[in-house]
Image (cartoon, helix red, strand yellow):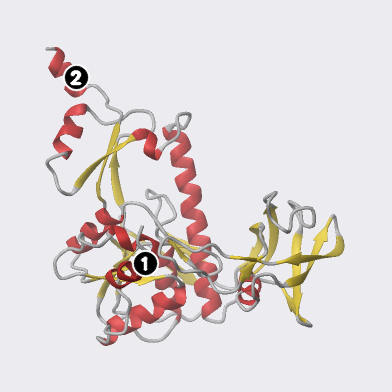
Amino acid sequence: MLAVIGLVMPSAYVVETAGPAIDVAGKYQGKQLVTLSGAKTYTSSTKLFMTTVSSYGTADNGVPSAQVFASLFAPDMQAVPVRALYSENETSSDVDKKNAALMTDSQDNAAVVALGKTGHTVAMKLVVAGVPKSSRASGKLTKGDILTSISAAGQKTEIRTYSDLVQRLAKIAPGTTVTVGFARDGKEKTAEIVTAAHEADATGWTHPGSKLGVYLSSKNLKYPVKVNYGVEQIGGPSAGLMFSLAIYDDLTPGSLGGDKVIAGTGTMSMGGDVGPIGGIQHKLVGASQKGAKHFLAPAENCAETVGYEPKGMKVYSVRTFDEAVKAVQAIGAGKTSDLQTCRDVVAKSPKK
């Protein structure tokens, strides 16, 4: 009797498995996932699937022990300690709110990047959200400052978008003294800041250029094209890459990837960088179930994909939105020999 009770009592584990793969250019639960208004759009034959993970159990209660035991014998299921996913004080309601906010951020970033790449610039104000004490900007910039310009080597760049700042910093070597213009309490000010190098990621790659060493947020975004999303029951930031590709495909003539079925995952920063996500092995399975033979993965997740690729599937590494666009175009044209696969990235990564 005690053994039976033990099997039905909540455990300290959540069980994860492949979630639905959803065509972001199509419909989900009767709603169009992405719709645009205010600009000319084009039809496309390319299928672009966002991939998800289904989790059983919550931050409040893990799944019954019997389900954890069953997952040990199911190759497509994984038992994960609740505390590995959620902090001790986090509730299910907290998690739902956080995931909803992350999804909204990913949608905003996807729209900003894709619209900017198609000539529909989203104007905004870049606000300092925080300055680490170890940063060279500490004591010069502070939370709430609005960045207005950056100057180096006699060349001044007005900051009207996140891309303005990122593109300029990408061409400035670490250790360069730059003049940053900003507004504080309604007054225009400047500060001399020495830029810092980016840290190498897990693959050994380093972002070109340098950084200011501050955390930024955006406000007062002005969208020249209205982007609406019809997904409500899925949270988290990992669909940013595929949303941005779908918007770009809508706004450009022809089919970005021909008639191919392409799946993928990855966060999207407002500067166009593709970031790592969780559960990629489950997402490969979900993509395969939809017939995808091509998968776009964040470079930093590549090590997790090797050996887990479904039969017949190629997994390509992408670090930026521009790389992802080129990859989709190459897949559509059937010319993938020059694309970098995740296996290529892992082979070149520093050995631990």
What is the number of the mark on residue 61?
none
Disc number lying in front (2 or 1):
1
Residue at the outermost front position: 351
Q: Position of residue 64 (x, y in %)?
A: 22, 28
Can residue 303 be seen? yes
Work out whether residue 345 or residue 25 is closer to the camera in this orientation and state it: 345
Q: Position of residue 33 (x, y in %)?
A: 38, 62
Say left or right for 159 vs 320: right
SS category of the residue bearing label 2: helix
- Disc 2: which residue: 6
Amino acid type at circle 1 is Ser
Say left or right for 65 vs 207: left
Residue at the outermost top position: 1
Q: Position of residue 319 (x, y in %)?
A: 43, 70
Q: Position of residue 107 (x, y in %)?
A: 48, 60
Q: Quadrant of the N terminus?
A: top left
Image height of 223 relative to 77, above or below: below
Q: Residues within 10 Å of mark 2 (few under 14, many from 20)?
A: few
Image point (44%, 39%), residue name: 95
- The Cα–Cα distance between marks 2 and 1, rounded to whole angstroms, is 45 Å
Q: Quadrant of the C terminus?
A: bottom left
Can residue 43 be seen? no
SS category of the residue bearing label 1: loop
Amino acid type at circle 2 is Gly
Work out whether residue 153 or residue 292 is closer to the camera in this orientation and state it: 153
Image height of 138 relative to 290, above or below: above
Image point (48%, 51%), residue name: 102
Image point (23%, 58%), residue name: 286
The mark nearer the N terminus, 2 or 1, is 2
- Disc 1: which residue: 349
Q: Are marks 2 and 1 in contact (CB under 8 Å)?
A: no
